[in-house]
Image: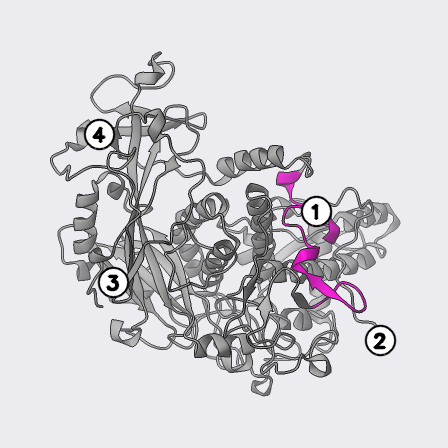
Amino acid sequence: MAQPLLVTGAVPLNPAQAPNRIEINQFILNEVHFSLFVQALDGIYSDAQGSLTSFFQLAGIHGLPYVQWNQSGGSNVVANSAWPGYCMHGTTLFPTWHRPFVALFEQVIQQRAATIAQTYVPAWQQAYMTGAASLRLPYWDWAANIMPPDAIIASTTVTIRKPDGFTHSVPNPFLAYTFNPGPPPASWGFYAPYSLWTTTLRHPSDDTATATSRIVELRSSLLAERAFVRTNTYNTLTTVNDWADFSNHTANPLQAPPLANSLETIHDTIHGTIGGTVGTLGDMSDPSVAAFDPIFWLHHANVDRMLSLWSALHPNVWVSPGTTYVWGSSWTLPQNAPIDATTDLTPFWRTATTYWKSSDLDGVDSAPLGYTYPEFNGLDLNNMPALTIAIKAKVDALYGPTVPITAVLSPAPTKGLAPPKTLKRKTSKVTLANGHFSLTDDAPAGAPGVPQGDSSNTSASSRPTIVSQGGRFFLSVSGSGRDSSPSGNANQAAVPHAAWTDWTAHVRVEKFALNGSFTVFFFLGNGTDPVSASVPADPREWHTAPSFAGTYFVFANGARQRCGNCVAQADAHQLVEGFVHLNTNKQELAGMSVAQGKRFLREHLTWRVAHPTRHPVRSGDIPSLSVTVGATPMWAGPADTVPARGQVQWFPEVTEGHTF
């Protein structure tokens, strides 16, 4: 048997100086890198589908057509493994499995680019050979720049410099992948509409063979999710401390929810936003075909970057021991097998006889796979305390939360009530009833940022507003004619802190409740009309409705019968979970007391479910869906660069009995 292809990553010229992956908005400005990447991507598009390193084969590792890749599986299958497939969605291996997967794609692209560079005319050859050596997969930082450049989502052609030394306008390979020689046949497991389409599509116009991508709708969805993605990303990076909570979207029904979304949950949102959440779903919205859309690779490069950032903020936290429980069977992993840092990340060979394992990887140091990220430039990876401080400052600057327009006033904290530096998840006092959970570990009365009682008589004009100057928060009280910035008040000890409440909807639902991907849309009424009036009759208008308050996207395989992990998860009624921050599109909530907020949300919060083939979806169609509202106290002083968070309180009574 021939030696399998080894995953080395793109090997740098100097192993001590691995090149950066670059954010896509900067990447497209580098003519050498962009020209090489476009040609390399087009080259692997054109390779025969049977070629091991063709785009079709590389994308197929993630899902359909569920065939053996690179001598992994088939005759090498572990005994009792019941179903095919490699991908580890919904498990603690989700982030680490994707790291060598993305590195493999980068490796193939870089090697093809190096070959192309050698064909340039002498006047350009050296520049392009040097550029090929440092070429790495660009990442799309959707938390900072959710709208990709036109060269990725809109332009039908791009301009590059080809080997003859002249610039040419060429078809844009980032826009879509064209199956070669035609639509993938149903005999390979592809199902309608994907078996009908010659190319990958985003927000497809319909489910016919002549469907086209809808760029206007794609842009609209991205803009609608922009603030939510930024907020979720920051909260995940800074408040989730446990690997199980960080790594994947699976919920434990016997535990309270984590403090924020998992990395996989945010990843799911981006998949749905690109592929579409209403009507016919594009390729990115279904795990079985998502990797065929070229933007998948830019997206997952950023998912990997988030793994590096989180690891820097949470040193010594890595893949925790666990079990696949009922789910987890794959072509090389048997059902009920334990998974941990030593589990093989198949089908990615590290040597001729061993696979990559999570224990071979380092969350912060990605240089062994041939790349780094700009945030780590110039930092000593061996000085973890200093590294954590430096990365925290960069994360704050990139994604730190904006402060709500209105806020209620709270006394400056005393020493005994100082904001905790690390928030621990509490699970000892959890009660479940009617599908809802509640916590009794509430913040103490009088804690900073916890409004006491019903302040319905508080005048809005007397509430302070928070302004940001130079990255710092300051209070400005309407009508007082003064502010609490350092220039306006020398006595900082007497300056009151701003306090407000972050209202959150927590969602739990069976992943395969509707046999494929679906979306929970949240709406907040205007306070006067019936809450039902806030929801447009046409789901295509939900993202742009004035009442839109966020989404939770369930990324579920539509070809689950071909995926062992998916079949097992469905049979086990696996629950997934996530959060929607209701303040994001309704900032008035921030200044309400707990009593006011509960009453407002009870009367004006509603939700609907969007599914590609079922409309309308009623609450009785999806009985596993549970929504619980929570309130987290927040506060900031004049010298704070980001707000502090208190202990969340959950109020199942706000949503109890809600139907749609």
The residue sitting at the right extreme is 122
Image-based side of 245 in relation to 531, left or right: right
Tag 4 residue: 463
Q: Residue at x 41, y 60 (%)?
A: 217
The residue sitting at the top extreme is 490
Q: Mark 3 or mark 4: which comes first in sequence?
A: 4
Q: Which mark is residue 536?
A: 3
Q: Which mark is residue 2?
A: 2
Crowding near pointer 4: few (<14 within 10 Å), some, many (20+)?
many
- Measure the C-alpha gap from mark 2 to mark 3: 59 Å
Q: Which mark is residue 31?
A: 1
Q: Amino acid at mark 1?
A: Glu
Q: Secondary structure at mark 4?
A: loop
Residue depth check, mark 1 versus mark 2: number of the one nearer the observer: 2
Q: Mark 2 or mark 3: which comes first in sequence?
A: 2
Q: Mark 1 or mark 4: which comes first in sequence?
A: 1
Q: Residue at x 85, y 57 (%)?
A: 119
- Measure the C-alpha gap from mark 3 to mark 4: 34 Å
Residue toward you, 109 or 326: 326
x then y, percent, for residue 344: 67, 66
